[in-house]
Image (tube, rainbow, N blue to C red):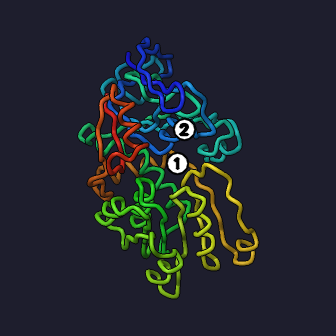
Amino acid sequence: MLSVRFEKPYSVCYVEREIPKIKENEVLLKILCVGVCGTDVQVYVGKNKFMKFPIVPFHEGVGEIVKIGSQVKEFEVGDKVVVEPILHCGQCRPCLIGRYNACDNFACLGVQVDGLGSEYFAIDPKYLHKISKELSLEKAVLVEPLAVGVHAAKRAQVKGANVLVVGAGTIGNFTAQAAKILGAKKVVVTDIDDFKLSIAKKCNIDACVNTSNTQLKNVIQDEFDLWGADIIIDCAGAKDAFLEILNSAGKATTIVIVGNHKNPVEIDLTKIQRNEIDVKGNITYTSEDFYHAIDWMISGEVVTEDFITAVYEIKETGKAMDSIVNSSHKNMKTMIRF
């Protein structure tokens, strides 16, 4: 089988490997497509602190089961599935209280361990979610990032609240859409990229604002009047953006951190303590979030128009990664077919 491997920063090679042999409690997937995430880009350029080269990349994937182990009962050959790519131990405190996304032994496919960038992949079926065969690959490959948005909106407890989402990329957009579906009073998304905002404007989000030439405080005042934002969700993962979020947050505001920050951020704890600001960490998702994401994709409650901005074949992975890094085209989500 053909596999993609990142050997070192900015280096992609294509290798022939044996098709994996499955254990009794595993299934063999034929990978149909993967989505390229910001995390994959960090891995490609060697700036993800959790990974080591060489690595087979990618964690957002859709596959078809082509072989099942003798102990597997819940799936059949021919089932179409999306992968939940966070491996967990099931034994630590977070796992035992149902928050396995914060597992002490957390490992993400394509980061800490080899990912879905191969034609075939052996996996424990507990990490799989069956989807309708009628669901297009373009929608199916977006289930995993949508699950991130679902989890973020649920962590934020958005029902009845004024919600500001900073960052209109795939995760920010899906977080904003999830907040609306889960009952937020008003949802506003900001970014400095007009292309991403143009997509957000098609997604039933109340307001989309370019903050290139305005401060976040002004957006909050203009969009939420005197009441302000009850919740601010950081989907940007940038130091300056987070500091502006903290400085703009009113008293008794909840801040949820979704975007991955590459470097430490120094903050004034007095601002948080004196204003009773709640700051919540947020990491990936659980199975329940996948169930919501799949249901919303099938029902059409989530808008995905124009999300897939580029499609490549597996042997074009290097070209795909370079096009994203070099911003050679307007990018929302790149898909790679196998």
Horizontal arrangement in the rendering, residue 299 relative to residue 229 (left or right): left
Q: Which residue lies furthest to the top in this view?
A: 18
**What's the amino acid at mark 1?**
Tyr
Residue nearer the viewer, 303 or 272: 272
Dot 1 alpha-carbon crowd within 10 angstroms: few under 14, some 14 to 19, many 20 or more: many
The location of residue 137, given as percent across then percent down, is 29, 39
Residue 290 position (above or below residue 233)? above
Q: Which of marks 2 and 1 is nearer the N terminus?
A: 2
Residue nearer the viewer, 8 or 2: 8
Residue nearer the viewer, 299 or 275: 275
On the image, which quarter does residue 92 sit in?
Answer: top right
On the image, which quarter does residue 296 sit in?
Answer: bottom left
Contact? badges 2 and 1 (CB < 8 Å): yes
Q: Which residue is drawn at 41% across and 51% down?
A: 146
Q: Residue at x 36, y 59 (%)?
A: 196
**What's the amino acid at mark 2?**
Ile
The location of residue 7, given as percent across then percent down, is 52, 24
Q: What element carries label 2?
A: strand
Dot 2 alpha-carbon crowd within 10 angstroms: few under 14, some 14 to 19, many 20 or more: some
Q: Residue at x 46, y 22 (%)?
A: 122
The location of residue 86, given as percent across then percent down, is 54, 38
Is there any visible trace of residue 72 in the rendered image? no
Q: Is mark 1 on a helix, strand or loop?
A: loop
Residue 115 position (above or below residue 196)? above
The disc at residue 86 is 2
Residue nearer the viewer, 74 or 326: 326
- Classify the position of the C terminus by image quarter: top left
Q: Mark 1 points at which residue?
A: 285
- Classify the position of the N terminus by image quarter: top left
